[in-house]
Amino acid sequence: MTTKTKKTTKKKTTKNDDILVNVENLKMYFPVTSGVIMQRVVGQVKAVDNVSFFVKKGETLGLVGESGCGKTTTGRAVLQLYKPTSGKVQFNGQELTELNANEMRAMRKEVQIIFQDPYGSLNPRMSAGDIIGEPLKVHKLVSNKKEYQEKVAELLSVVGLSPYMADRYPHEFSGGQRQRIGIARALAVNPSFVVCDEPVSALDVSIQAQVVNLLEDLQEQFGLTYLFIAHDLSVVKHISDRIAVMYLGHIVEIAPANELYFNPIHAYTRALLSAIPIPDPTIEKTRERIILEGDVPSPLNPPEGCVFKGRAKKKKGQKECSDTTPVLVEVSPDHWVANCPGCMEK
């Protein structure tokens, strides 16, 4: 995959004015019920459990982890597509969890999402122009048909599609083109924050690079802020300014992209990075591959204390995992790690 070099601007300090999205102690539990007629709650799936992070204006925060760790649920809970069980989500200083349906609908002009599946996220009965233009009508951003058509044509051009494609239907487009339509739909309301929910995972590798480059160009052109969710660590490293690593509903490490890749501290982060293939066979042959022990626990019954308990290979003299839930501690500037003595490598 050939991608452009990302330009990064390093900031020594983070002021409150720089933070666009601030998430504190976010929990998203899904009830498990039993019975057909008289259903009762018998348990809870702890998809997101006490997650905290922030996203600065104009940056891209990557959110990585294996399938089922809670990445997508986190993104949707931030946008209030799922009503969080508890926690705070502040957007530009405004608490989203306290907004009613009408107030949140108005807020949709500021926060948008690009869905993972370019095939299932587009209505097959609507033309590309109607899909892109629907948000314009919902939020009453155009006053007449001519303005509407001009705006749709402009959005198609912005994402690299020809305006004459507006009358085509989703089945007439390739996967990459459909994802561009989804991007154009998200941009229609001129948002400032976009959750990119694995936007390239369903695409061929050659097309992935084009879409990632497009997202970077759009970010620079429109001053966008991204929460970029993915499991492909090479893609995340390229596009992200900072990266948060998620495991079983918890964030275990957050750091600037280069810092995370060259100085991973948590055992789970090190295992993920060791799985990235390297094209140089000499380096690939000599580097250590970390194989995790056991299986991922069920979010219905996660381990008490450290959720990574029992999966990291213990080295001589290494302490056991914590019996209390680890909290993130800053081990170096902007580098935060869950403070479990059995998972941290100093």
Image (spheres, rainbow, N blue to C red):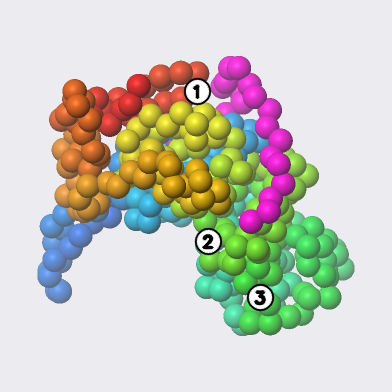
For residue 178, side relative to residue 286 (left or right): right
Across and down, in percent, residue 302 comes to 19, 46
Q: Which residue is mark 3?
A: 174
Q: Which residue is mark 2?
A: 201
Query: For numbered disc 2, what is the local secondary structure?
Result: loop
Amino acid at dot 2:
Ser
Eyeballing the image, is 331 above or below 269?
above
Across and down, in percent, residue 24 comes to 40, 32
Among numbered discs 1 and 3, the one appearing first in the sequence: 3
Q: Residues within 10 Å of mark 3 (few under 14, many from 20)?
A: few
Across and down, in percent, residue 231 comes to 46, 52
Among numbered discs 1 and 2, the one appearing first in the sequence: 2
Give the residue at x 60% y 62%: 205
Q: Residues within 10 Å of mark 2 (few under 14, many from 20)?
A: some
User: What number is the disc on residue 334?
Assistant: 1
Among numbered discs 3 and 2, the one appearing first in the sequence: 3
Give the residue at x 14% y 73%: 37
Report if residue 320 lies within the magenta region. no
The residue segment tinted magenta is 1-28
Quarter of the image with the N terminus in it? bottom right
Query: Between 261 and 158, which is closer to the camera in this rendering?
Result: 261
**Label 1, label 2: how far apart the Cα atoms are:** 28 Å
Query: Between 205 and 215, which is closer to the camera in this rendering?
Result: 205
Give the residue at x 60% y 17%: 12
